Image (tube, helix red, strand yellow):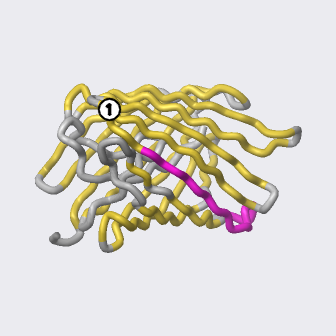
């Protein structure tokens, strides 16, 4: 398993006191002006391997533009490693309205962090989000390019059910296809879980828990934890 970075936050609709992130799937809402967010996602596999990522998101002038960075790392079997760093830009092309979803495409530079990965890479993701009553649906499609011959496409989706404004049931699926010696290896990860949160003035703290199950080229299961803290950096 590997921890995926999730992105985004905006002013939530009344039924959704949290409009944060899915665990593996991006929700198509940039950070609102004056607010930045700290996100930590960690997964532990049944073998004891830990994969985690820290992301920090900042609006640039307004909600339309957002910059962020993602720092992945892993630990297990007596070793620790830092993954390739992502520098991310997202553009809020569409906000959600009746009859149309929110859309906020992302372009990321993948910066090598070790001698074994010396080539700059790129990642693109196209996230959409749309509310239907007490359910929010989110869809992703994109890919990562590294070392010219390596292309890893991915797709994902999530459904978030608001039992209460600050308590949501979550169901996600994420599939990617990686280069292999004999063609490509495809893995699918399904994550049922929940998230909850607390507001303290203009600050919000969110925690989540999921049970990822991976099938395909990799067969695994484990636990996933999610932490988010957003706060103002200027008066609006």
Q: Answer above or below: position of 57 versus 76.
A: below
Measured as percent of width and height from the top left, residue 141 is found at 57, 45
Residue 101 sits in quarter: top left
**Residue 39 visible in the current orientation:** no
Identify the residue at the far right of this view.
Answer: 182
**Residue 214 visible in the current orientation:** yes
Q: Answer above or below: position of 100 versus 133.
A: below
Q: Residues within 10 Å of mark 1 (few under 14, many from 20)?
A: few
Q: Quadrant of the C terminus?
A: bottom left
Residue at screen point 13% across, 50% down: 200
Horizontally, residue 107 falls left or right of residue 31, namely right
Measured as percent of width and height from the top left, residue 175 is found at 62, 36
Horizontally, residue 44 falls left or right of residue 229, namely right
Residue at screen point 33% across, 46% down: 20
Measured as percent of width and height from the top left, residue 60 is found at 35, 72
Frontmost residue, 56 versus 14: 14
Q: Main secondary structure of the magenta part?
A: loop
Q: Which residues are magenta?
A: 114-128
Measured as percent of width and height from the top left, residue 99 is found at 35, 42
Residue at screen point 62% across, 31% down: 188
Q: Quadrant of the N terminus?
A: top right
Tell whether position 138 is magenta: no
Q: Answer above or below: position of 61 versus 163.
A: below
| SS class, disc 1 | strand
Identify the residue at the far front of this view.
Answer: 99
User: Where does label 1 land, which residue?
Assistant: 132
């Amino acid at each position: 398993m590997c921890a995926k970075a999730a992105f985004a936050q905006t002013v939530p609709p009344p039924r959704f006191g949290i409009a944060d992130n899915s665990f593996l799937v991006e929700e198509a809402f940039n950070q609102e002006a004056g607010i930045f967010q700290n996100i930590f996602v960690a997964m532990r596999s049944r073998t004891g391997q830990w994969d985690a990522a820290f992301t920090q998101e900042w609006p640039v002038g307004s909600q339309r533009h957002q910059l962020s960075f993602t720092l992945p790392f892993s630990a297990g079997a007596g070793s620790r490693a830092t993954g390739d760093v992502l520098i991310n830009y997202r553009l809020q092309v569409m906000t959600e309205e009746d009859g149309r979803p929110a859309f906020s495409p992302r372009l990321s530079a993948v910066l090598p962090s070790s001698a074994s990965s010396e080539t700059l890479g790129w990642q693109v993701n196209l996230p959409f989000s749309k509310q239907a009553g007490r359910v929010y649906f989110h869809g992703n499609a994109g890919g990562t390019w590294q070392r010219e011959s390596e292309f890893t496409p991915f797709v994902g989706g999530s459904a978030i059910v608001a039992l209460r404004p600050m308590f949501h049931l979550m169901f996600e699926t994420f599939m990617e296809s990686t280069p292999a010696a004999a063609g490509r290896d495809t893995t699918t990860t399904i994550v049922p879980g929940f998230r909850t949160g607390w507001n303290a003035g203009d600050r919000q703290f969110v925690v989540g828990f999921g049970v990822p199950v991976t099938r395909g080229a990799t067969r695994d299961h484990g636990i996933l934890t999610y932490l988010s803290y957003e706060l103002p950096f200027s008066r609006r």
